[in-house]
Image: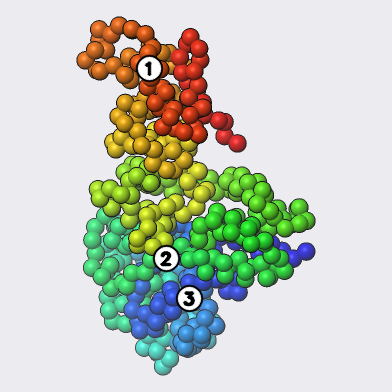
Amino acid sequence: MTENPFFHRGPIHDPTYFHGREAEVKQVLEMLSQRQSVSITGPRKIGKTSLLLYLSQQEVMRQHRLDPARQLFVYVNCEGLGELKLQDLHALIVKEVADRAVQLGRRLAIPEHPISYLDFKGILRGLADSDEKLNVVLLLDEFESLSRNQELSSKLYPGLRALAQESIVTCLTVSQRPLGDCSEEYSPFFNIFVPLKMGLFDESESRGLMERYLSRAQAAFSPEALNGILELGGGHPFFLQVVAYSALELQRMKGVPLENQDLRILTQTVRSQVESHFDYYWRHLTPEERYVLVALPLTQNEDAHREQLKALADHCLIIKEREDEGYRYFSPLLRDFVRRQEAPDVLQADPFVLVLPLQRALLREKPLPLNPRLFALLSYLVEHPGRIVSNEELDREVLSPPEERQQYQYMGDDRLKSTIRELRRALGEEADRIVNKWGVGYTLEIPPEE
């Protein structure tokens, strides 16, 4: 049995597995060949490191009419380097440059003493001014790690900017956020970069990934199963791999092609694998972004939330297929995760979402028209799911005006019964969620998570 090709959980080192990103590869290599520095941004696990490694492949350079003998692409993983002193960082980069230069038949003399900026510049200039006129490109992955150390970055940035302006070196940085957002202080260094965002695959790229990998495994999915896998993966390279890996394993275990009913098992299997990644995204959102994300079907129509919507789209958590369409969660897996989180000013109890500032509700992701009285009643029940709330408490806390509550007297449940009937009519097929405990009160029944 051939190996499952959807095994990538980290960067792709084998270029034969790299898929898509044709436009990004073409644009970046064109810029770098002209000694133009580029800044690539994109969320975690979107494939930024895989792109860097792919760009440095000699065969890829040839495909884009670059002479590999004149391109010195040097990969540096900056994660954890933010605590280094500038001279130590220079030494580390020079060592990586020297190792790469050996592959082009060049041996560099590296000083034994601490490498100052002048030493650093001299070594790189020697390569740029050589007979081959080498294009020295520093591929700086996880670049924001350097930005967190202001003492380091305040010295590093001017030096790199000067080297780039003198065509001694070209920089290709990778970070989750734009460079200007990675540092507390603005630097002219940021002005030398052409920005490039990495986002989700479109449907064609996603299907192409499936077809290409499945052909390696001499396997296939039924059209129905493939559509379900693509929907769960949502065009995200990492999550497509996670879903497809589990799908292929499930299909091999069954011994027959997956059917629609198998997608339920697949969803539950994958859910446990993606939870930690969604939790990472969630923890790095602002309270405002969490609110907008949870209440997306409603907040996306509010002008006040344009900034948060743009940020969520940049994080690849939401997507808009066309300009004339609204935003949606990139995957049902994310939607299910969001429905289990707490967010400011939002009440959630499957299948209800109540957005308190807007006084509006969702039922199974669709707007649920409720007048203020019905909204208040449903909100109170959602706030206490599974608890039997007495008739008197509901009448006092929900249906009585605030000014009457201090001297409240319970006059019977006729008013409450009428409001309950009205709410049940509004809920339609979900009316049975509101259960009457005779002689006691009412409760909102929420089915246990499967």
Count of marks, rendered view: 3
What secondary structure is marked by label 3? helix
Whether residue 69 sits left or right of residue 7 in the image: it is left
Taking the spot 36% from the left edge, 73% from the top edge, the residue there is 38
Q: Residue 376, position in %: x, y?
A: 34, 26
Name the amino acid type tagged 2: Met
Please tell me which of labels 2 and 1 falls first in the chain.
2
Does residue 413 show up?
yes
Q: Which residue is mark 1?
A: 416
Q: Which mark is residue 429?
A: none
Discs 1/3, front: 1
Q: Tag 3 or tag 1, which sits nearer the N-term?
A: 3
The disc placed on residue 198 is 2
Q: Earlier in the sequence, mark 3 or mark 2?
A: 3
Q: Where is residue 166 drawn, in percent x and y?
A: 28, 81
Task: Say which residue appears at 37% left-offset and 22% top-offset.
Answer: 419
Q: Position of residue 175 (x, y in %)?
A: 39, 61
Q: Are marks 1 and 3 in contact (CB under 8 Å)?
A: no
- Report, in whole angstroms, how far the alpha carbon at label 1 lies from the one at label 3: 62 Å
Residue name at image x 57 percent, y 46 percent: 271
Mark 3 lies on residue:
22
Query: Quadrant of the rendered structure where residue 7 is?
Result: bottom right
Q: Position of residue 133 (x, y in %)?
A: 40, 89
Task: In the rendered view, tell whether residue 122 sits above or below residue 223.
Answer: below
Q: Secondary structure at mark 2?
A: loop
Q: Nearer the viewer, residue 306 or 395?
A: 395
